[in-house]
Image (cartoon, helix red, strand yellow):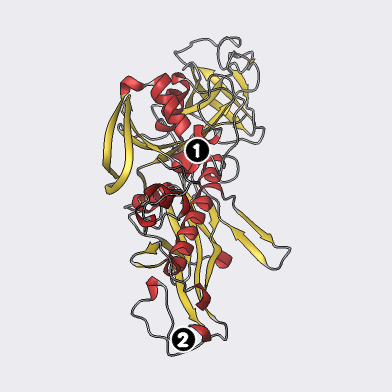
Amino acid sequence: MPTPNQLSNQNFDNNLLLNLLNMPDRVKKVWDISGGYNTLTMLVDQLSGSKSRRIYGMDGKFEKYIIGRNNVIQPINGISVLNGNGTLTVTLADPAYNLFRVGRTVLDSNNFEGRVITAAAGSVIIQPLANPAVFVAATHFNGALAGGCFIKDGWDSSINQGSTGSSSLYEFPSPIYNYTAVTRANADWFRRNESATWVENAGKYWYSSIDVFAAQQYAKQEEFRAREGVRSQTTSLIGGVVNQSGGIYWAIKDTANDGRGGVVRPMATNPVAADLEDFIMEIANRSTSPNTELIALCGRGALANIQTNMTLQYISNSGVLNTFGGKEVKGLDVRTYSIAGVTVKFILDPYVSDKERFPELSAAPGGVIGTKRSNDILILDEGSFPAVGGGSNPAIERCYFGDKDITYGYMNGIGMQGGGMPISMNGMTFNQIVSNRDSIEFMIYSDSCPADAVATNMGYMYLNI
């Protein structure tokens, strides 16, 4: 049999080997190896009922008001002081804290009780009740115990006859805020692009895909923004004030500023089953619902670790047709894990599994599988929060400023008059030239926040080394 560099008397057109080695593979289809990125933004759309919310805040700033942080509780600072009349003076960790009220029963971390007889900023004086009948400073309300000790408000304890009302304790809604941010995408289509190609896009030559791929790149950008964005408003060195929307990771980590934050678990070692279960339980315990449903977006390394080293016997495959928040989602391979009234739907997350975008490796011990970011676990709240006055509010939603969420269009140039056009422009007429350029310019504009979250019941576990 002749080798490729030898002469052959076979007909060239029929010489399969020579054709394969010397001619391009002229097929019409194109293989897209970029990977599906928009898992989070798709879930945001489903969980919010496929509705973006229009906001009207000045300069793209919008607020939400939350309540529910109404527990009266404080860490105890050191050993409480036993007074001569048998009462205890309890020093609070926050010297300005003054929400404990006279006449109410309080408890410590071991459920020992006392009645508040004096309350002031940074301290309370309590008398003993039945449990215990006599205070021992080393045992009761002792902040120096291993693991610390808290004092917690319990209930009102009024006298049997001639009682008076207790002091009021109001909860005012706390504002949390985010920004919508202007994002744009453009694509130029020149007449010289209109060359015939073997590869096709929806039955036309490849140049007809220019606007389609610009839109796909924009969607990919929105996934980046929905995850990695950190809320800010800064002045650009190239001119003007620039908003940046806070994404899901920022919202979960925002435990100090807004009070919207969730459960953050940076891991210095590869997580084991106890780490995962404790992580899930802490998130679930933030909700009073007896049955909690959570969504876990897992990198390929995290999912392999879970299935190989942790809970294989507890996880069942739910298939590829699933519902989230009452909405059907097709094409996601979902595995379900249930424990103690908590159901977690594990979904492979292509975003963090992309080795090209996240090539970094982890130095964490414990047999880490794959790259560092492929071991991320992002847990979302599938439910909603009750709204004061009735109804409910989504835990995560897309918001926008202006008349429309996303605006797109085409600007026709002189050279394109009567020429070819993108697929999306089929059926449109171009009697007006708006530019002297030899092009059609495709533009996308949005002033939006892709994933604003009240992340109280959400969590993020990741390797930090």
Mark 1 vs mark 2, CA separation in Å: 55 Å
User: What is the secondary structure assignment of the residue under circle 2?
Assistant: loop
Q: Which of the image's four quarters has the N terminus?
A: top left
Query: From the image, which quarter does the C terminus lie in?
Result: top right
Q: To which residue does mark 2 refer? A: 417
Where is residue 96 shown, x and y percent of the image? Answer: 65, 36
On screen, residue 294 versus residue 317, left or right, reads right
* Res 13 label: none
Ranked by sequence position, the earlier of labels 1 and 2 is 1
What's the residue at 57%, 50% (across, down)? Answer: 229
Q: Residue at x 45, y 75 (%)?
A: 409
The amino acid type, in three-letter code, at marker 1 is: Gly
Label 1 neighbourhood size at 10 Å, few (<14), some (14-19), many (20+)? many
Q: Position of residue 424 (x, y in %)?
A: 38, 72
The foreground one among 175 and 98 is 175
Q: Tell me, yes or no, whether the two marked residues, 1 and 2, touch with CB atoms within 8 Å.
A: no
Q: Is residue 238 at least partly visible in the picture?
A: yes
Residue 388 visible in the picture: no
Image location (x, y in percent) of residue 142 = 59, 16
Q: Residue at x 62, y 21 (%)?
A: 89
Residue at image location 37% in from the left, 81% down from the top:
428
In front of the other: 12 or 16: 12
- Residue beneath disc 1: 262
Residues 162 and 64: in front is 64
Residue 31 drawn above or below residue 89? below
Q: Secondary structure at mark 1?
A: loop
What residue type is disc 2 on?
A: Gln
